[in-house]
Image (cartoon, rainbow, N blue to C red):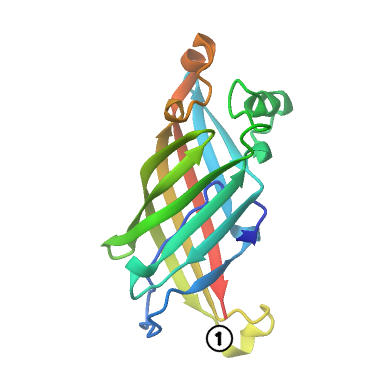
Amino acid sequence: MRNLLALPGLAVIGLMALGEPITDTRPLDWNVDARHTEINFSVRHFFTPVTGSFGDYEIDLDFDPEYPEKSSVRVKVAVASIDTGNEKRDNHLRSADWFDAEKYAYMTFESSSVKRVAKNRFLANGTLSIKDAKRQIELPITLLGVQEIPEQMREMLGGVGRVASFQADAQLDRRDFGVGVGSWAETVIVGAGVDITIVVEANRP
């Protein structure tokens, strides 16, 4: 796995090229650019959306534009890296009331299959593990674009020859993973549904 700023959340991720077809039929190992990759989430406090992110994660991305079924994504997120812009709230989220980060340091997603569902849209099926719960989920992924880098610019960009960007959007019920279910306050004041947005920029020579 590559060490990043962080996916998240979550991680994770997308699979088809624009423009000229790529003839390499092997799954392609892409380098995820941490400077342009984010794992973000939003959850309601009563009626108000509260946003946050995870700043420490690893992503492995195999992206085959011609054969998406050969593609895969693996994401590992450090739970303690949660950041909602409020230190007291973040510490509470790390506690046993919520993520119990000391006992369950990571949450992970690993795809078991990827399929194309539209021109630039894909569906990754896989296992999401949070705390001691494992659930099979479907992660919708959109390919935002692929850019070939002109030869004369590649040295300036450290040898990068192609850049691809992806976005994954999903909604989870945190109660399915035992997050914040210890008292009525956590389940009534804070919404059960969590919206997750993952944006990934990746490159290869």
Label 1 crowd bin: few (<14), some (14–19), many (20+), radius 10 Å: few
On screen, residue 182 above or below 141: above
Instruction: Assign a secondary structure to mark 1.
Output: loop
Residue at 60% over, 20% down: 97
Q: Position of residue 85 (x, y in %)?
A: 68, 33
Q: Residue furthest right?
A: 87
Q: Residue furthest left?
A: 117
Report whether 150 appears left or right of 169. right
Q: Position of residue 167 (x, y in %)?
A: 45, 55
Residue at 55% over, 72% down: 203
Q: Quadrant of residue 117?
A: bottom left
Report whether 143 appears left or right of 1. left
Report whether 63 appears left or right of 33. left
Closest to the observer, 51 or 196: 196
- Residue 44 visible to the viewer: yes
Residue at 51% over, 33% down: 132
Three-letter amino acid code at the position of disc 1? Pro
On screen, residue 186 above or below 44: above
Location of mark 1 (residue): 150
Q: In which quarter of the image is residue 26?
A: bottom left
Quadrant of the rendering where the C terminus is positioned: bottom right
